[in-house]
């Protein structure tokens, strides 16, 4: 039985053919002037999506490499840091900071809940020596999106810099680095960039951040941002040539759709999926769900891992499960990146059919109806076209 | 707004990535021994899908080229032929036969209706000098599938040969050349073969057909089957090298799914679409719809051409319209070739949303529900997996 690959995970995300084909072009020498021009173009394009006039560096690494870059370049052993831990990726900031010997202050949030501005305020008041605040735009493990604009407002007035994990959030959710005052943000290629994995990005927007980077005493080499700044817009070490071709194509596609429209598309699709899920009588997991993905509580009478298996094996549809303590308890439907309206319809139809196949008789067609109605309503919104 | 290409026309049909990639491989010299082996393998594979132990020839042409081959090789000017005309492609047999100076006997069937065996019986009784009967397995313009097995039963006992246009029908609908006694059948690559256009196939199964080919006096050169037979399994003129790579990949995929399963898949999908269409209160066009495509009457209050435009521009979904006198009056939803269950869901969802967008308020979600229910029921059929 034919089953097409339908990947609706929050990274990797579906890659358009035009981006894939860039990966099949001849690999240039990484110091070829033609490739240098491509790197320069990519760096310019990245500034637009990070909304910064600062530097955006291109690393051959996964998103975690970019996170490590942010940690290794901003703290020295013993430095006080505030980390916001409300899921797997907030936890990763804490693990990285511990690995680099930071003096930890963790704001722990129940997974699925979101960061309150007061929590940051309190943490900074109690820890006036905080050097860096590490937080998350879109917490991929729970679907929660945090109010980074409000957080930046607080951190701006403290003697600290703000580092944001925007790995799954960038391009899908508004992030205004310069306007809001986000000092450093990191992202990865396999998310809303609609590219294969392999590249990560580190944006540095402020003098405050550069001062921190110059003073940091953590050992670092491959991830040393001073080396990247010296060579900018070239890379200090071998650039991932074909991935850079793909990055330029992706940036071109985003620019042609316009970043504002891409944000809006993610909002429309996530809203449609939330309505579809609720129409089926299922529950949303996140208290403040963002527009990157929809985390859904697995009904009590259903095996969450089996659900993923059946939807994959029967329909070729790849959803993500829960991570760590959420394993088997939630499933996550991403609308990140190269996803269109009919992908949203296919996702909810898969959920309906899979649950019915597993003996959970949700009303077939109700989820799809809610998704279609939501999409049709969005079309009537004149600001959307 | 992202719109993926979703081609649900009865040719070209969606092409799997593995088949597309064969088209990107290095082009061999067409007399290279390696390529000759590929041609031999393709010819063997083609016999299996045509269900014949006879010859199957590979032409660099469209399906119409294969139809012309069948005409030019079987008749001489003035020969009596019977053509079955119940749509655009039955009409094409008649046009070809007229172009080659045949003595015409046309069985005209209202478009959308199907051939009755008695019509063939009567035609052959009234025209005992008939040399060739030209008919159509799947009439792509109307969605009708004819009972070729019953037709063959009649023609077998007359002094004529039976030629079948299986261009859109082969692989999607059962056709048993040897078992039923179909003398010549033709097909094209851009249909259930899930390949790009560019290749056509002519299968010759019987001694009766070869006798006819040897005796025919119509002028022919590029399409002369005697030249193809002489070189078999090589091609007399330059073979379409990369398309042959793609053909072998396609045949491999069909063999791995099994031809019987592919027939069944087409039956399940077409049945699901018919149920979805009826659940929306729309009418089927064909009196005996086949499993290749579903032809739907455009509701009176809707502009049929506008419907195609909106579904294409808003959802990236490509349906076919009506041809000739049916232009604007029907639309056709194909489930031919590389189509999966979620493509069927996407197609019916597109119809629902497009009609609503155009002010025709069909019940959103009802069509999808019917399609999903039909697919779930098919899964319960134990002979289907």
Image (tube, coloured by chain):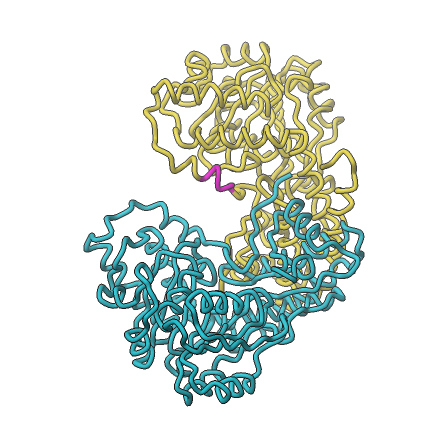
Chain colours: A yellow, B cyan
Residue at x 41% of width, y 72% of height: B185
Residue at x 65% of width, y 69% of height: B274
Q: What stretch is highlighted in magenta?
A: A15-20
Do we see residue A332 in this rendering?
no
Q: In front here: B356 or B196?
A: B196
On the rendered structure, is B265 left or right of A106?
A: left
Indicate the position of residue B305 as horizontal and vertical percent values: 68, 52
> Can residue A16 be found in the magenta stretch?
yes
Location of residue B70 by image quarter: bottom left
Q: In front here: B267 or B102?
A: B102
Indicate the position of residue B38 as horizontal and vertical percent values: 27, 58
Indicate the position of residue B137 as horizontal and vertical percent values: 50, 73
Q: In this view, does A326 lie above or below B76?
A: above
Q: Is residue B101 above or below residue A111?
A: below
Location of residue A125 by image quarter: top right
* Predominant SS of the magenta segment: helix
Residue at x 66% of width, y 48% of height: B309
Do we see residue A225 in this rendering?
yes
Quarter of the N terminus of chain B within the rendering: top right
Q: In front here: B355 or A151?
A: B355
Indicate the position of residue A380 as horizontal and vertical percent values: 79, 42
Count the marks.
Answer: 0
> Can residue A68 be found in the magenta stretch?
no
Q: In this view, does A372 lie above or below B272?
A: above
């Amino acid at each position: 039985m034919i089953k097409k690959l339908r990947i609706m995970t929050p990274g990797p995300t579906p890659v358009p053919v035009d981006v894939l084909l860039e990966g099949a072009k001849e690999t240039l020498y990484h110091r070829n002037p033609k490739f240098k021009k491509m790197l320069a173009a990519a760096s310019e394009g990245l500034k637009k999506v990070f909304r910064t006039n600062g530097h955006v560096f291109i690393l051959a690494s996964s998103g975690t490499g970019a996170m490590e870059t942010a940690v290794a370049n901003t703290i020295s052993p013993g430095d006080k840091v505030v980390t916001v831990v409300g899921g797997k990726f907030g936890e990763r900031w804490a693990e990285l900071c511990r690995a680099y010997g930071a003096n930890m202050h963790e704001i722990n949030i129940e997974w699925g809940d979101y960061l309150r501005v007061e929590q940051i305020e309190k943490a900074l008041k109690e820890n006036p020596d905080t050097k860096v605040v590490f937080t998350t735009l879109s917490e991929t493990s729970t679907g929660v999106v945090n109010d980074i604009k409000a957080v930046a407002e607080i951190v701006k007035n403290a003697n600290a810099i703000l580092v944001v994990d925007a790995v799954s959030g960038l391009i899908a959710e508004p992030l205004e680095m310069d306007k809001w005052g986000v000092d450093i943000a990191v992202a990865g290629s396999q998310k809303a960039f609609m590219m294969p994995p392999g590249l990560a990005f580190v944006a540095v927007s402020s003098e405050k951040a550069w001062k921190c980077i110059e003073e940091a005493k953590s050992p670092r080499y491959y991830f040393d941002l001073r080396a990247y700044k010296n060579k900018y817009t070239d890379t200090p070490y071998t650039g991932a040539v074909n991935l850079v071709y793909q990055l330029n194509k992706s940036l071109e596609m985003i620019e042609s759709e316009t970043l504002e429209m891409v944000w809006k598309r993610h909002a429309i699709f996530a809203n449609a999926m939330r309505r579809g899920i609720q129409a089926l009588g299922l529950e949303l997991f996140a208290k403040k769900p963002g527009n990157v993905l929809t985390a859904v509580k697995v009904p009590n009478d259903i095996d969450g891992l089996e659900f993923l298996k059946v939807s994959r094996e029967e329909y070729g549809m790849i959803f993500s499960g829960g991570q760590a303590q959420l394993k088997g308890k939630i499933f996550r439907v991403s609308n990140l990146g190269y996803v269109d309206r009919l992908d949203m319809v296919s996702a909810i139809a898969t959920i309906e059919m899979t649950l019915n196949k597993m003996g959970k008789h949700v009303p077939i067609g109700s989820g799809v109806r809610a998704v279609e109605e939501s999409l049709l309503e969005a079309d009537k919104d004149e600001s959307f076209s």
